[in-house]
Image (cartoon, rainbow, N blue to C red):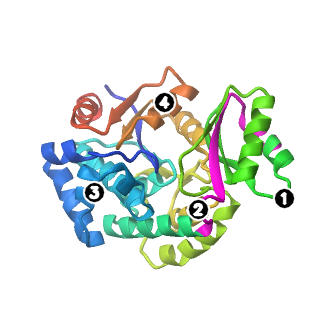
């Protein structure tokens, strides 16, 4: 199969017990990735991925580095097998995985940064004061309008523009609840409250973004060796400096995922590979374009399929 394809990396929420275990058992490159991750953080991150409970994996200091490590363990196996994508993108946290895969960030810096990122995001809003909810059946313009209408002095805004009719809102808990009720009144099919520890990707995260910026400024960013699309612009970053700036903005700004996938399609991407735990991103691609092939490469069987069909 000769196709221009892109690799997509999942974000927070894809964590699950056992992620990466089969990869480590099958691929030396994946085992080495987990060993590198343990050394970078000075703690047994691999053991958390393989055997951590749901409660442990949900802890702020664990969630983001474990997902990043499991995603990059899958990528290492694909890269050693000869997979050479035309582009990368990652959903929220997954953008760090994309930048590591593209050679812009090194693994140790990425792991330490996302560990701190999770803590900063949790500290920005006291537990219980924020919320997020997925609104299904309305488009981005409709959701933005109803958020503005029901805010009533609080924060509620589109946070993840995931698919044409799947928009996640984020903000103060009461305002998010009002937005959900207004969405149902406007014809939304469903409103699904999300089990999250903080209201990500809204203006309540500005303190986290400000705390993250000097951390990002202190680590080196190389120019991407392969095109990487940024969440905040839905466009490629051309330099390391652009990649750093996009990550700093990303914490408190919406994830423009639907636009990102469309931009990749417009640039000639014909197929996508979801690299890492879960299959959420595959579903979002299909919600936009059902005719576009999507492969899942989070486990050995999927990795072998991707290598067989797409490796040069």
Q: CA distance from mark 3 to mark 4?
A: 27 Å
Q: Which residue is label 3 attached to?
A: 48
Write the residue at 85% across / 54% down: 152
Q: CA distance from mark 4 to mark 1?
A: 35 Å
Quarter that holds the N terminus: top left
SS assignment at label 1: loop
Quarter that holds the C terminus: top left
Q: Which residue is label 4 attached to?
A: 283
Image coordinates for residue 269, horizontal then vertical, percent: 47, 34
Image coordinates for residue 188, horizontal then vertical, percent: 72, 28
Write the residue at 21% across / 36% down: 300
Q: Callout 2: 10 Å neighbours few (<14), some, many (20+)?
A: few
Write the residue at 76% across / 50% down: 175
Vertical side of 156 occupied by 125: above or below: below
Q: CA distance from mark 1 to mark 2?
A: 20 Å
Q: Callout 3: 10 Å neighbours few (<14), some, many (20+)?
A: many
> Badges 4 and 2: C-beta atoms under 8 Å apart?
no
Vertical side of 225 occupied by 289: above or below: above
Q: Residue furthest top?
A: 291
Q: Which residues are magenta?
A: 124-145
Which of the two labelled residues, at mark 4 and mark 1, occupies the earlier sequence position?
1
> Badges 3 and 4: C-beta atoms under 8 Å apart?
no
Q: CA distance from mark 3 to mark 1?
A: 41 Å
Of badges 3 and 2, nearer the viewer stands 2
Which of the two labelled residues, at mark 3 and mark 2, occupies the earlier sequence position?
3
Q: Number of labelled discs?
A: 4
Residue 11 seen in this snapshot: yes
Q: Which residue is label 2 attached to?
A: 127
What number is the disc on residue 153? Answer: 1
> Badges 3 and 1: C-beta atoms under 8 Å apart?
no
Quick check: 174 left or right of 237? right
SS assignment at label 3: helix
């Amino acid at each position: 199969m000769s196709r221009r394809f892109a690799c997509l990396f999942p974000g927070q929420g894809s964590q699950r017990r056992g992620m990466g275990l089969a990869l480590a058992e099958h691929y030396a490159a994946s085992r080495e990735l987990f060993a590198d991750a343990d050394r970078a953080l000075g703690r047994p991150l691999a053991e958390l991925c393989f055997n951590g409970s749901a409660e442990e994996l949900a802890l702020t200091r664990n969630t983001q580095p474990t997902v990043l490590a499991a995603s990059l363990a899958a990528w290492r196996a694909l890269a050693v097998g000869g997979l050479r994508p035309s582009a990368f993108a990652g959903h929220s946290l997954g953008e760090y995985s994309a930048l590591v895969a593209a050679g812009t960030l090194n693994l140790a810096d990425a792991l330490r940064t996302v560990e701190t990122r999770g803590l900063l995001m949790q500290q920005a809003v006291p537990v219980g004061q924020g919320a997020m909810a997925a609104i299904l059946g309305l488009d981005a313009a409709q959701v933005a309008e109803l958020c503005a209408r029901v805010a009533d002095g609080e924060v509620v805004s589109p946070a993840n523009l995931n698919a044409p009719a799947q928009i996640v809102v984020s903000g103060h808990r009461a305002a998010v609840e009002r937005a959900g009720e207004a969405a149902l009144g406007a014809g939304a099919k469903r409103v699904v409250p999300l089990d999250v520890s903080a209201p990500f990707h809204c203006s309540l995260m500005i303190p986290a973004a400000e705390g993250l910026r000097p951390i990002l400024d202190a680590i080196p960013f190389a120019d991407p060796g392969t095109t990487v699309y940024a969440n905040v612009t839905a466009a490629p970053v051309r330099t390391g400096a652009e990649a750093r700036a996009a990550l700093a903005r990303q914490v408190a700004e919406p994830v423009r995922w639907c636009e990102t996938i469309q931009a990749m399609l417009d640039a000639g991407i014909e197929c996508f590979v979801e690299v890492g735990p879960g299959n959420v991103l595959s579903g979002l691609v299909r919600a936009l374009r059902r005719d576009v092939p999507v492969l899942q490469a989070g486990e050995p069987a999927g990795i072998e399929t991707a290598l067989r069909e797409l490796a040069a």
